[in-house]
Amino acid sequence: MNVLVDKQELKDSASLDRRDHHQPSERLIGRLISCTGSRGVISTSATNLSGTTADFWSIGRLISINIGETRIVGIVYEMNTSSDLWSDTVANIIYVKVELVGEISDTPTGPAFRRGITSYPHLGAIAHRIRASDLQAVYRVGHGVPVEIGKLSQDPSIPAAVNINDMLSRHFAVVGTTGVGKSSAVSILLRSAISVKPNLRVLILDPHNEYTSAFPDISVTIDASTLELPFWMFKLEEFVEVVFRGRKPSDGETDILRDMIALAKARYNSGGGVSSTLIKRPLAFDNGGMTADMPVPYRMSDLLKLIDDTLGKLDPGHDRTDLRMLKNRLDSLCHDPRFKFMFTKSTIEDNLDRVVSTIFRIPRTDRPITVFQLAGLPSEVVNSVASVLARMAFDLAMMSHGAYEILLLCEEAHRYVPQDPKLGFVPTRLAIARIAKEGRKYGAYLGMVTQRPGELDPTILSQCSTLFAMRLANEHDQEIIRSAIADSSASTISFLSSIGNREAIAFGEAIPTPMRMKFLFQNKENLPKTASGIAEVDRTSDASTVNLRALIARMRGADPEALA
Ligand SMILES: Nc1ncnc2c1ncn2[C@@H]1O[C@H](COP(=O)(O)OP(=O)(O)OP(=O)(O)O)[C@@H](O)[C@H]1O
Ligand SMILES: [Mg+2]
């Protein structure tokens, strides 16, 4: 590494390549002194790096290496001085390590970029600042409708664009430590997606009740008081999760529900009432082949009556204590105001129409986004609700034969699909995995947002083909993202721990080349924020002025406005 660059030579060659003749040449060009298959080292000299020129040789920047017909594009990933010292008076020799990402050739329509290197640069080749037109060519979205979501960090005059179709259809993820701007980025991405895809419907699982404010004009909000998901839409496992409140039921308890729900469904399907003959016969033969998981409605009254009748039998075939407990539990659930969303009084048929049209904004709507404020829901049902919604999203996209495309956006995605298979709720995991694996064929897409990619199921993360990696402090999380990048551009994210707020390294299907970008600045009105009255911290009150009565009333679900 002791090849020193002749300063005069550098100046001479700079004058050939340099576009801005006022810039000191020594800072703007260097010479290639080493090259492996995918990487190179450039030697240059500098007396002082400051101002805009300091930006030139800095991590994450693209530079170009001139080899005559074409220009090789490299990304700076490491820099050091030859002496490990810095002098303010004499020129310092610096080594700039770059990863070679592709090459640019001039065509009649302007510069064109191609990934990969066909002819390698020779030693001594001149490296210099990349031209703006070359930079644009590197990040030009070649097909589809490119949508601007931000600006390049390297040159804020150049838009950072993504191909929305590719981003959606191969799923995407936004990862980054808390407060870096993930939710704000998601709001930009969703607005862009809606603008180019009128038949897209978006379901946001919003655990912090923050997205309503980001889309006041194009979303509807469903919260604990307006949610309607009839109990019969829940699969057995999902229903069990609600009924037993997250505790693992005994086999006996699950068996009762399985048998009784199948009977109640058979009863609904046959259009009659619960006859005593039905339950006198052995249960296995009573349900007409119906299972508890078939997508057929049933009535809660039938289910309760079936349990009652079974209890009254000489040999109920189930543990009496289990039967009694289950009946009590169902009874109290039906009357618990927090579970009103599952046990509404309206008729089953009306219900389904309304549920589908409210949740999925079908048939037509100018508000294609549905925000599910999960913060107000009992925590033990959040998992089940997420599972039902993910399942419905997939089924509906599939059944509409492409008429509707549905994006399920999961904030805090690691809650639903955690890395540890023992955590999380199996049906939610399965429903999300199904969209991840097969959704693309039918128009069901995933958007995963998480602070902790290391805690997210790696198979789900690997299905997200476009990744917006924002600042990540945790080494393990960085490692996960590094391994998620298939190609050699791993050094692109070597600086992931130090990028600024709103900045992201975007890579994958929707972006031609990994790019360091800054999301567009959003006005306050378009930013996600916590819904007022639910979790917002009131900085004006202190412990001595808290109104306990109002606090308790609020815990009981009273309207905060009415309390004022
Ligand atoms: N694109 C943007 N335009 C303007 N301000 C932004 C933008 N992105 C982030 N911010 C600012 O940063 C703050 C935090 O952003 P945001 O809530 O999106 O972060 P986050 O990564 O989602 O955080 P958390 O992990 O806590 O959910 C915002 O309240 C806003 O003030
Ligand atoms: Mg957020």
Image: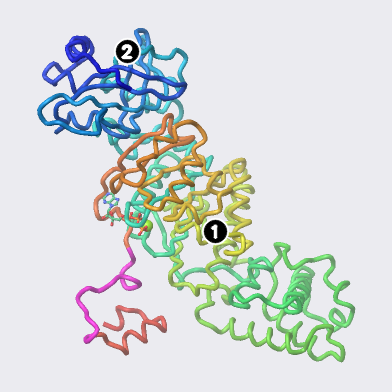
| Residue 199 image position (x, y, % from top left) | 49, 44
- Whether residue 532 is in magenta: the answer is yes
**Dominant SS in magenta:** loop
| Residue at image point 33% right, 33% down | 78
Q: CA distance from mark 1 to mark 2?
A: 50 Å
- Which residue is label 1 attached to? 418
Viewer-side residue, 381 vs 96: 96
Viewer-side residue, 1 vs 118: 1
Viewer-side residue, 194 vs 104: 104
Q: Is residue 284 left or right of residue 139?
A: right
Type of amino acid under label 1? Pro
Type of amino acid under label 2? Gly
Please tell me whether residue 105 is drawn above or below residue 40 in the rendered image.
above
| Residue at image point 64% right, 48% down | 399
- Which residue is label 2 attached to? 124
| Residue 410 image position (x, y, % from top left) | 48, 56
Please tell me whether residue 111 is drawn above or below residue 430 in the rendered image.
above
Q: Quadrant of the N terminus?
A: top left
Q: Which residues are magenta?
A: 530-545
Dot 1, how many residues are within 10 Å of its Cα: few (below 14), some (14-19), or many (20+)?
A: many
Q: Nearer the viewer, mark 1 or mark 2?
A: 2
| Residue 225 image position (x, y, % from top left) | 45, 73
